[in-house]
Image (cartoon, grey):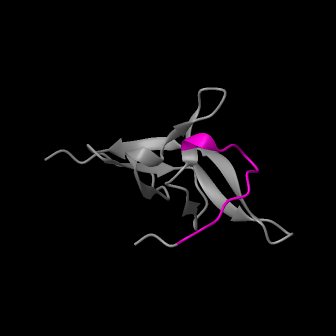
Amino acid sequence: TLNIPADEAQAHHVPHAALVLNSHGDVGVMLAEATEENDIISKFYPIDLLSDTASTAWVAGLPAKAMLIIRGQNSITDGTIVQVSEAK
């Protein structure tokens, strides 16, 4: 057994399908965020890939609480007004 010390990091477990590229080629995810006007808009967050499996990835770089957009994320940009529903 080999133990390698590593710094702790906050991470989120996300499906690969949620990963998107922005116009600069950065890998990230689209999150839904509330505005001061009570709209819900999309916002791109670049991520650091920590590890992945065949269908999911552990990523860092997101806020502690994040509403991940998993449908239509490839067809929206920052600031697009979105509707939110809970995952089933």
| Residue 7 appears left or right of 31 | left
The residue drawn where x is 63% and y is 47% is 45
Residue 1 % position (x, y): 13, 47
Residue situated in front as seen by the camera: 84 or 2:
84
- Asked if residue 80 is among those painted magenta in the image, a careful observer would answer yes
- Location of residue 25 with respect to 82 vertically, above or below: above
Q: Is residue 6 visible in the rendered structure shown here?
A: no
To which quarter of the image does residue 88 belong? bottom left
- Location of residue 24 with respect to 48 vertically, above or below: above
Residue situated in front as seen by the camera: 62 or 25:
25
Segment colored magenta: 74-85
The residue drawn where x is 85% and y is 69% is 36
Residue situated in front as seen by the camera: 68 or 53:
68
Dominant SS type (magenta):
loop
The residue drawn where x is 65% and y is 44% is 76
Residue 56 % position (x, y): 34, 49
Residue 74 % position (x, y): 56, 41
Query: Farthest top residue?
Result: 24
Residue 26 % position (x, y): 59, 32
The residue drawn where x is 69% and y is 51% is 43
To which quarter of the image does residue 40 belong? bottom right
Query: Farthest left residue?
Result: 1
Q: Is residue 48 visible in the rendered structure shown here?
A: yes
* Count of numbered labels shown in the rendering: 0
- Location of residue 16 with respect to 64 vertically, above or below: above
- Asked if residue 71 is among those painted magenta in the image, a careful observer would answer no
